[in-house]
Amino acid sequence: MTNQEITDILVHISQILDIQGENPFKTRAYLRAAQTISSLTFQLNSLENRKEIGKLPGIGSGIAKKIEELLETGKLGYYEDLKKSKYAPLTEFLKIPGIGPKHARLVHDKLGIKTVEELEKAAADGKLRVLPGLGEKAEKNILQGIQQMRKYKERFPLAFIYPRAMAILEDLKKLKEIKKITIAGSLRRMRDTIADADVLAVSDNPEKIMEAFINLPQVAQVVAHGHTKSSIVTKDRFQVDLRVVGAESFGAASHYFTGSKAHNIRIRSLGVDKGLKINEYGVFRKDKRIAGKTEEEVFSSVDLPYIPPELREDRGEIEAAQKGNLPSLVEARYIKGDLHVHTNWSDGNNTIEEMAMAARRKGYHYVAICDHASSMGIVHGLSAERVQRQIIEIRKVNKNFKNFRVLCGTEVDIKPDGELDLDSDTLRALDIVVAAVHSKFTQPEKEMTRRIVRAIENPSVHIIAHPTGRIIGKREPYEVDMDKVMDACKANGKILELNAYPERLDLSDIHCRKAKEKGIKIAISTDAHMTDHLEWISFGIATARRGWIEPKDVVNTMTLAKLLNYLRH
């Protein structure tokens, strides 16, 4: 049983308990355990790693025993009994934006609704608006949420597929018959959502590669099994296509299957202008292959330098390459710290010192502790008094470090009127203030824009976190005029966050590009709630690269001294 399978079961248990009206501490315990396991960099299903279960943060002895039962038997008696509950099928409703556990139970108990189709019909017939706590607006939002759910049903967040696809890649790399191998498609371009994964390989023995591929432990279904191409569906429910090509065509195939389609059309068009034919097999002049072993050869054949995969969207990258103006994109090695992490002082799993140690192990020079303020409704959210106590604790922790600094910060809520949920004196005592919208997402565009702009104009605020509020596949961005938000940031010298939390990636690549053009600094931060989440910085970096972001555009590429000076001014 894989970590993902265990995670899915724990999440499902949490959801069923939530709908049943169980104690919220119990439901959150299962959810927190699921989050811990999904973030692990190793599989629990080896005998050696099973010993680590009881040591994992956020996993108590009761849940640890259940995980051990899953690993031992592949089943969990408690879960099997829970699935017999009349509320178990209603967890499908929780995928719909606007539907929570209470509403899922309400529509079942009052109207006998058991399926999404029944829910959709009831909403279309106006039967939900009469239920307590719903109404006509909620009914409309539920209909929109169902459409949104279906829109994302066949796509997965980047951070879900990427590590699983790379695990398959690593398994295939172990085969001595593999000479070269790479991911391709939208996954290589690091789009925020992915439909499936593409893998390209070079081998003189493709039959053996295909046989090994369809028999990988991750395989749930073999869709196709051919001589040079096979497709499988994994136990995690996404498709992977593997192609084996000749070494002479590897570069051309990598370019072709990486895409995007629009980018490829432009490259082929440039080839036609030079009397060349460019396809997945190579670059040809008449019937003679003249290039294609590497991607560099493909680009060089049309007088272009190498264009990084993240830029290949036909958004001006070809024109920039022709003029020698391609950006020098940000990379992980430039990041000197994380400016938005949480601890167990609010809703995080780890202590301040544990988060600091994890950041230091990544080679960072600093990390900003930005726990939630109390009015957010977050368990253990910090009052002004607790913020002062945390500042004292952080100062104590900093005495244990040399050449590393824990910054005192907060993630303060932007109230519907634009006011902040901590007083100015408290905010001025902090090194860094991250402000974010966490409620009233349905405000009209003018009100939401005015709300965020007012926070930007507050002299205590440094960074606006996850500026559009999107949750990929679950919640669309709220209505906000991002041009006005960015203009306010520019006028007030404020920073926009690119939140690397896998379900957010907010700012999007498009907004990153626009912020860069307006001269607004970006903070690439993880919003980490446990030490393992610090690794999510890679997904933020990927999104930044898609937005043409360079190291000079990112505040957390600065040294500590430069950063603190920048924040002060």
Image: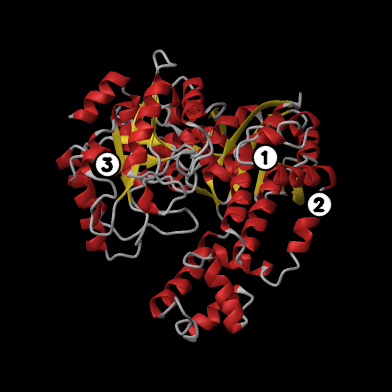
Q: Residue 212 is drawn in which quadrant?
A: top right
- Give the CA separation, mark 1 to mark 3: 38 Å
Front residue of this view, candidates 458 and 144: 458
Residue 297 placement, left or right of 85: left
Relative to 123, does residue 477 appear above or below in the rendering? above
Q: Residue 75 carries which label?
A: 2
SS label for mark 3: helix
Q: Label 3 is placed on what type of residue?
A: Ala
Q: Disc 1, disc 3: CB below 8 Å?
A: no
Dot placed on the residue nearer the N-terminal end, 3 or 2? 2
Q: Is residue 340 visible?
A: yes
Dot placed on the residue nearer the N-terminal end, 2 or 1? 2
Q: Report the quarter where the N terminus lies.
A: top right
Residue lying at 83% horizontally and 43% vertically, measured from the top left = 72
- Residue 241 lies, in percent from the top left, at 66, 45
Front residue of this view, candidates 405 and 98: 405
Quick one: label 1, few (<14), some, or many (20+) residues within 10 Å? many
SS label for mark 2: loop
Residue at the left extreme? 491
- Residue 8 lies, in percent from the top left, at 66, 52
Q: Which mark is residue 515?
A: 3
Q: Disc 2, disc 1: CB below 8 Å?
A: no
Q: Report the quarter where the C terminus lies.
A: top left
The residue singled out by tag 1 in the image is 243
- Numbered disc in front, either 3 or 2: 2
Residue 131 placement, left or right of 34: left
